[in-house]
């Protein structure tokens, strides 16, 4: 247990650097969510969000009804179903939201199968959240009518839903801007989570690895009557606990900052799952850095370059929807890309469309695969180096 | 025999670092491994500790073949490496506790051992210091404390006094003698012959990876059978006197320079008297007279034709 105990004593030396990363992150998150909150209330009253609606479900009444409802409540800019043109439209802010009703949507919806309206948004756009909410509202109403409204044809259903929704006054105005603000806040928080968890864990894990891997110390440790495997296991246990502590601290902070809105979103466990996967990725990268660099200067450089570089290209700092296709193509080879992809998907989920979880699980698995690959590479590298 | 090394061969690529090197360490000894820089002392120690793979040879410690997983043997070995090996991130007492804890799991016993080790190396007032705040000599002392805190039966010290001031050095040497008195067997490497001469009960002289000689100090000196050298301070000695002196019995060399006459005798007895009798008989008045015993350096010089310390 000696190695395990020493782990956390050695960690003290990096505590300063690590708390700075966490403090900066928390500071930024709070600042952003405070800055964004009031804007939103104003906007709601004034603007109708420019959106594009791509209906691939053709003449199905439910899909038509949804498109119509969106046209009533937002400003629909007509666009053809052409990915390139749509990307441009988003990029130049011609539209802030693209809703795609997939083929077979109405039929799936009525038969209770998983279905979701896909969307592409200008990330960070506040008004796109309202479009989300409208789609959600439409589908929720439709679900209610379908389940409790007796036998209705699709046309009748679509008509009743439209009628229901038409009666409604925009009640949302009353909802406090603070709640909406902090809702935006936690979406933002969990995107940036990637940076905080990556930087802190990489820093901590690599510091420990460097301390124990100094050639003289490694030799000295090998003189002791403790099998190298046991020492390595103790280190691994230390890394695991350290990573989990960093993760829990960051998750707990999100509860403190965004408590009610986060919990009521029903997305907490998905965020936890995704961040946990990225935590494993971060530990693996820290492991790689720690066994590759020798000096603290090189270590600090590596941590900064990797954390900043990956977070930029992967879409943490700049939303993926704004990044050019070239950058995204590169990003695909970085775990942060998949983290953000899953994170965006989670943030776009709502209760009515909660069927669309599979792609999120996929992204999580891809992250874990990255972590496994990085761990394996590191083990190979160190094996090769030790065979002197 | 606590340690037996036989025909050890170790290559670093093309460099033959150990060339059929052999040595033995008996229980209770302080064995000095003496050799110039690069002679293979550290390589020998690292091979004995199974830190290095070697090409040929047999190594036994505590009567058993030494191997990386010979944990029972390792438990009774203390190691003080040539390069200080401590955690920069841990305090003095934490470092000692860490290394001691690899051998002693009982926390209470360990606390006592750590205190004792701190006392032993005189780091009491630096207990809570981090290594980077320690001077070079204090750091060496910490390195020693980390190696011996668990009271091992067999201790390897690889040049533990390099860069240590004379005062600390004496304290360290005294400490090693103490450990030995308390029952520890010590293997001590150094290229300071004075140190080895002062401390060690038996000495192995090595160079270029080979054993040159081994034995006690006196055995080694007897080995070169160098007789002794007498130096006499004399003013203006004529060359024919020097020639005469060369003819005296047992004289192998006689040189006169800087008003000093150095006469080298090869065995024989009463050599000094013979020389002084000659000087008196010629009415040559002389100043101080020295008679020099051979040093380990002479031994080294005799065997290799080189000075131990360049
Ligand atoms: N890892 C290594 N790779 C290549 N050559 C090495 C290595 N370690 C030592 N050597 C060489 O092996 C020889 C013996 O080195 P070693 O360190 O054992 O000498 P030493 O007697 O301990 O010297 P010193 O008094 O300087 O500590 C030297 O010539 C050295 O250059
Ligand atoms: Mg050496």
Image (cartoon, helix red, strand yellow):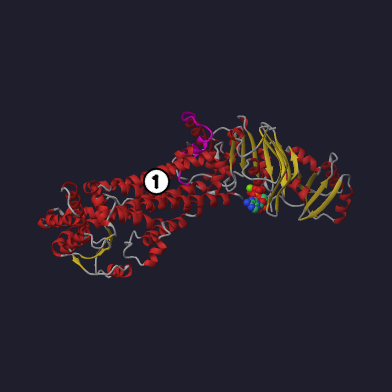
Q: Secondary structure at mark 1?
A: helix
Q: Nearer the viewer, residue A254 or A221?
A: A254
Q: Nearer the viewer, residue A247 or B49?
A: A247
> Does the magenta run of residues contain B97?
yes
Q: Residue at x 38, y 47 (%)?
A: A15
Q: Is residue A66 left or right of residue B170?
A: left
Residue A257 at x, y = what percent?
24, 49
Residue A366 at x, y = what percent?
41, 53
| Residue position for label 1 | A243
Q: Is residue A99 left or right of residue B6?
A: left
* The residue carrying mark 1 has its beta carbon less than 8 Å from ligand 1: no
> Does the magenta run of residues contain A116?
no
Q: Which residues are magenta?
A: B88-109
Report if residue A87 is visible in the image: yes
Residue A242 at x, y = what percent?
40, 44
Total marks in image:
1
Q: Is residue A66 above or below residue A268?
A: below
Q: Is residue B101 left or right of residue A352?
A: right
Report if residue A349 is visible in the image: no
Residue B114 at x, y = what percent?
49, 34
Chain to which mark 1 belongs: A
Quadrant of res B158: top right
Q: Is residue A104 above or below residue A280?
A: below
Crowding at label 1, few (<14), some or many (≥20) Cα neighbours within 10 Å? Answer: many
């Amino acid at each position: 247990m000696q190695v395990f105990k020493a782990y956390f004593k050695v960690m003290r030396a990096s505590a300063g650097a690590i708390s700075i990363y966490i403090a900066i992150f928390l500071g930024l998150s709070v600042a952003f969510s405070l800055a964004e909150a009031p804007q939103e209330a104003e906007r709601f009253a004034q603007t109708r969000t420019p959106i594009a609606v791509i209906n691939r479900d053709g003449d199905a009444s439910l899909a038509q009804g949804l498109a119509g409802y969106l046209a009533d409540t937002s400003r629909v800019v007509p666009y053809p179903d052409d990915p390139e043109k749509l990307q441009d439209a988003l990029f130049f802010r011609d539209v802030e939201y693209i809703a795609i009703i997939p083929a077979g949507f109405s039929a799936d919806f009525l038969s209770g199968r998983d279905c979701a309206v896909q969307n592409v948004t200008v990330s960070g756009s506040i008004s796109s959240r309202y479009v989300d909410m409208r789609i959600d509202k439409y589908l929720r109403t439709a679900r209610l009518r379908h389940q409790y409204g007796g036998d209705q044809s699709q046309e009748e259903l679509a008509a009743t839903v439209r009628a229901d929704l038409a009666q409604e006054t925009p009640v949302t105005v009353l909802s406090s801007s603070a709640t909406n603000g902090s809702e935006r806040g936690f979406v933002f928080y969990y995107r940036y989570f990637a940076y905080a968890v990556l930087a802190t864990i990489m820093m901590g894990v690599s510091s420990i690895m460097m301390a124990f891997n100094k050639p003289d110390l490694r030799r000295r440790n090998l003189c002791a009557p403790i099998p190298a495997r046991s020492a390595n296991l103790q280190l691994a246990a230390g890394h695991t606990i350290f990573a989990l502590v960093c993760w829990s601290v960051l998750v707990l902070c999100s509860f403190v900052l965004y408590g009610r809105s986060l919990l009521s979103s029903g997305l907490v466990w998905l965020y936890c799952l995704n961040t946990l996967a990225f935590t494993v990725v971060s530990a693996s990268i820290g492991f790689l850095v720690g066994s590759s660099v020798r000096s603290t200067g090189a270590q600090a450089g590596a941590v900064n370059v990797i954390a900043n570089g990956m977070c930029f290209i992967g879409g943490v700092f700049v939303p993926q929807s704004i990044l050019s296709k070239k950058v995204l193509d590169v990003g695909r080879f970085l775990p942060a890309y998949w983290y953000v992809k899953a994170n965006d998907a989670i943030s776009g989920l709502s209760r009515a469309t909660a069927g669309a979880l599979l792609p999120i699980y996929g992204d999580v698995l891809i992250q874990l695969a990255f972590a496994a690959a990085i761990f394996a590479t590191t083990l190979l590298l160190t094996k090769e180096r030790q065979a002197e | 025999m606590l340690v037996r090394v036989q025909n050890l061969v170790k290559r670093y690529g093309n460099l033959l670092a150990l060339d059929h090197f052999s040595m033995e360490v008996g229980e209770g000894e302080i064995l000095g491994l003496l050799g110039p820089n690069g002679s293979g002392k550290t390589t020998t120690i690292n091979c004995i500790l199974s830190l290095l793979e070697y090409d040929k040879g047999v190594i036994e410690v505590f009567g058993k073949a030494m191997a990386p997983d010979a944990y029972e043997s390792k438990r009774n070995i203390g190691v003080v490496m040539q390069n200080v090996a401590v955690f920069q991130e841990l305090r003095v007492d934490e470092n000692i506790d860490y290394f001691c804890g690899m051998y002693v799991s009982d926390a209470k016993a360990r606390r006592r051992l750590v205190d004792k080790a701190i006392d032993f190396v005189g780091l009491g007032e630096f207990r809570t210091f981090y290594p980077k705040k320690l001077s070079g000599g204090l750091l060496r002392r910490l390195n020693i404390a980390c190696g011996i805190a668990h009271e091992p039966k067999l201790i390897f010290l690889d040049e533990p006094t390099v860069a240590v001031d004379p005062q600390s050095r004496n304290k360290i040497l005294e400490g090693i003698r103490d450990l030995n008195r308390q029952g520890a067997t010590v293997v001590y490497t150094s290229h300071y012959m004075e140190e080895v001469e002062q401390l060690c009960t038996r000495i192995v002289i090595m160079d270029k990876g080979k054993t040159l000689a081994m034995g006690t100090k006196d055995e080694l000196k007897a080995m070169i059978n160098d007789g002794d050298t007498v130096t006499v301070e004399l003013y203006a000695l004529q060359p024919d006197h020097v020639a005469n002196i060369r003819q005296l019995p047992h004289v192998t060399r006689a040189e006169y320079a800087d008003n000093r006459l150095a006469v080298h005798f090869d065995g024989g007895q009463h050599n000094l008297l013979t020389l002084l009798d000659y000087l008196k008989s010629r009415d040559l008045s002389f100043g101080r007279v020295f008679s020099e015993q051979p040093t380990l350096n002479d031994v080294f010089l005799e065997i290799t034709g080189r000075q131990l310390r360049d």
